[in-house]
Image (spheres, helix red, strand yellow):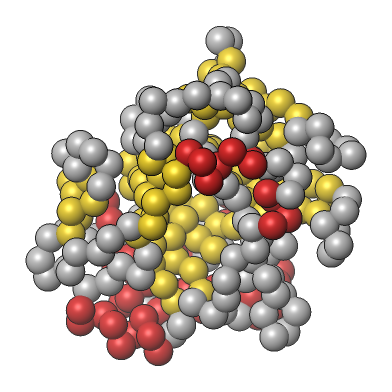
Amino acid sequence: MINLEKISGLPIDVLDDYYLKFNPPLHQIEPSIRKFSDMTPVLQDKSAKVDREEMYYMYRDIHLPDDTKVIRDNNIRYDITVIPSVMIGKEFNKTVGHYHPNNSQGYAYPEIYEVLNGEAMFFIQKMDEKFEKLLSVSAIRAHAGEKIIYPPYYGHIMVNVGKDVLVTANWVSDNFDSEYKPVSERGGMAFYVVADENQGFKFEANPNYSSHPEVRMISTDFMKSFAIMGSRPMYSAGVEQPELLAFLNFPEKFAVELSAITS
């Protein structure tokens, strides 16, 4: 069992079967489960076999009862995702991937993540408006306690590149539904993150894309202009100062700061 209370600010444990236990005053939430059969369209090796059907778990809209009003008033949502350390052929276990739509001002919704346990590879890519041409590809490595921001217009996945269970939390606008088709119809992201004996991991091109720009490893340096990136648990900072999360619903007001993330 892994206790997440100190790092997340919430009384939550990760059980040995990868399910979460919500302790009082939280109410227990049942997860949405991404099964192996759901992931086949985005895998590098579609004939790969694994010894489990449940590949990762998504717990949505987590909050203390006293924080309901501030969360609803600000149209934000706090989620936790649990990704076991499993190899799928050569490929590390991952989320299936999606894009965010634009808000009413024509700016795509961003998102912020915090790693609560394990080691993550956040993989992001930007395509043209018709999802025909790949414009750029970047990756960010992060460990427990680190936060990253997905900038607008970038499709994204999380990859568990560590040996321990990966647990991440996110704050996101509650005003949209994610778009999965642009990723699934191309068999995944532009590159697969696979095991490598020398470096631990490497990127292998997905042939369903016509071009493959070099994958840029970027740091969180250009994300630090956002105060929510500080050392406090992201949940606590968000509910006590929801204005720190205004960029999630109004990215047009933070266009300069968000565009700098991938500079």
Please indicate, yes or no, whether residue 60 appears anywhere in the rendered image: yes
Looking at the image, the residue that sits furthest to the top is: 197
Please indicate, yes or no, whether residue 122 appears anywhere in the rendered image: no
For residue 209, what is the image quadrant?
top right
Q: Is residue 33 above or below residue 39?
A: below
Along the viewing direction, whichever of 31 and 76 lies nearer the viewer: 31
Along the viewing direction, whichever of 144 and 54 lies nearer the viewer: 54
For residue 86, what is the image quadrant?
top left
Please tell me which residue is depicted at 17% across the width and 69% down the height of the picture. Answer: 27
For residue 26, what is the image quadrant?
bottom left
Q: Is residue 14 above or below residue 252?
A: above
- The picture places residue 118, in percent across and down from the top left corner, at 37, 36
- The picture places residue 129, in percent across and down from the top left corner, at 84, 64
Please tell me which residue is depicted at 18% across the width and 53% down the height of the picture. Answer: 21
- Where the N terminus falls, by quadrant? top left
Along the viewing direction, whichever of 203 and 115 lies nearer the viewer: 203
Please tell me which residue is depicted at 46% across the width and 82% down the height of the picture. Answer: 75
Please tell me which residue is depicted at 75% across the width and 45% down the height of the picture. Answer: 186
Task: Determine whether, in the image, residue 32 is placed left or right of residue 142.
Answer: left
Along the viewing direction, whichever of 190 and 43 lies nearer the viewer: 43
